[in-house]
Amino acid sequence: MKRLTIRPATPEDAAAITAIHCSHISVWRRGGKGDIVPYEALSPYEQWLHGGPWMNAETCAAHLRRWQETGHLTLVALLGEEVVGEAEFVEDEEPLPYGHVLHLSLLIVHRAYLGQGVGRALVDAGVTLARERGCIALTTQPEQAAEPFYHRVGFEPWLWLREWQAPAREVFLPADLRRADDAPYPAGQGLVLRVGRYQASRHMWYEMANRPLPELARLPWGRWQAPMPGGEKLWLGLRAQPLAPTQADGFIWMPPGADLRPAVEALQSLAARLGFAFVDLLMEEPEGRALASALDLEFQTDLTFWRMEIGEQSP
Ligand SMILES: CC(C)(COP(=O)(O)OP(=O)(O)OC[C@H]1O[C@@H](n2cnc3c(N)ncnc32)[C@H](O)[C@@H]1OP(=O)(O)O)[C@@H](O)C(=O)NCCC(=O)NCCS
């Protein structure tokens, strides 16, 4: 039996990582949702539409390099000499109850090697990394089909999120709103990601500005800041959805407990100015439900954040 080992990934692993991701795609479609065509007939962007930068060895290598430069972590699992699994992590810190965590943003095992302990070994390596970095928990946002696996390896559902769709329309914009696309992540400023927690807060900040192909670079996006009455800052973000570019994903970073409604209305207004028809708002329950009812927003989908506690928050 081949030995299972885990090590940090390098950009040279890109082709093997692409093979792992492609092993889970049964059909390739023109433009991501059109006619069925062979993989080779698709442009890198069309391949990207099937699941992101990992779908093409070149975009995967660029992703691994940028991920590394940004200080994020990637591990690969090997059976003997063969790379058969991949995990990506983002270290993040927000005020409690989120805290200092290591977020598992991606976990995948080659279809031919499922059920052999590879996924568990990558999660265990993540726990070790999280401990080394003094994190209090490992978090993840699993696809529903993978939830039994996450339960089995020690995660529990922790945060219930619901995505709502709001029409883009001019409602309200704070005075002193300033566009700041290139701003660094506002770490240590007492802010939390109140809208748009598809992955960890720092990851979403990074992803919003990540536009590695010309087709993605053309999609509208933006980041804005405004001062809050308490002296903190409010951050707003919008990013077009590649498969539905008239719709934006919305992001709001603000202090916990601050009134979310004016920030949501500001996002609706900015979305209208950027020419979007709708903005999707992923909010925590039950806060999201209350706001959705007040603003008459349309339900889209549910997501759950899962968490494995691994230690105490250091003072
Ligand atoms: C989810 C995934 C990473 C699991 O990897 P894996 O290597 O097959 O899992 P392991 O063999 O390490 O399984 C660990 C445990 O989980 C259990 N398990 C794995 N998949 C399971 C499933 N779908 N349902 C129930 N239990 C499952 C295993 O039986 C095993 O239990 P045991 O240790 O008590 O025997 C893999 O199925 C995968 O890559 N799926 C496609 C991509 C994906 O869904 N990624 C996660 C997105 S959030």
Image (spheres, rainbow, N blue to C red):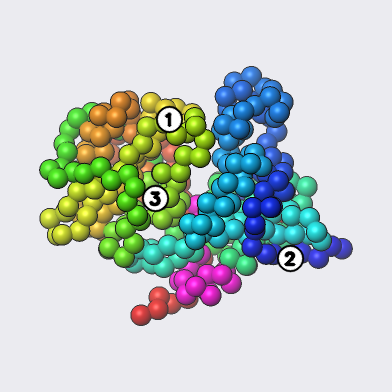
Q: Residue furthest right?
A: 1
Relative image position of residue 102 (x, y in whole percent) = 49, 64
Which quadrant of the view contains residue 181? top left
Residue 306 within the segment the image draws in magenta = no
Query: Counting other residues with Cα less than 10 Å from the Cα at mark 3, is it few (<14), some (14-19), or many (20 or more)?
Result: many
Horizontal and vertical percent position of residue 159: 41, 55
Label 2: element kind: strand
- Image location of residue 135, percent across then percent down: 46, 71
Query: In this rendering, which labeled residue sits more in front, label 2 or label 1?
Result: 1
Residue at horizontal 16 percent and vertical 36 percent from the top: 172
Q: Earlier in the sequence, mark 1 or mark 3?
A: 3
Residue type, label 1: Arg
Closest to the observer: 96 or 94?
94
Image point 56% across, 70% down: which residue?
129
- Give amino acid for label 2: Thr
Say if the magenta span includes residue 140: yes
First-in-chain label (2 vs 1): 2
State the extent of the magenta-drawn residues as a range. 127-141
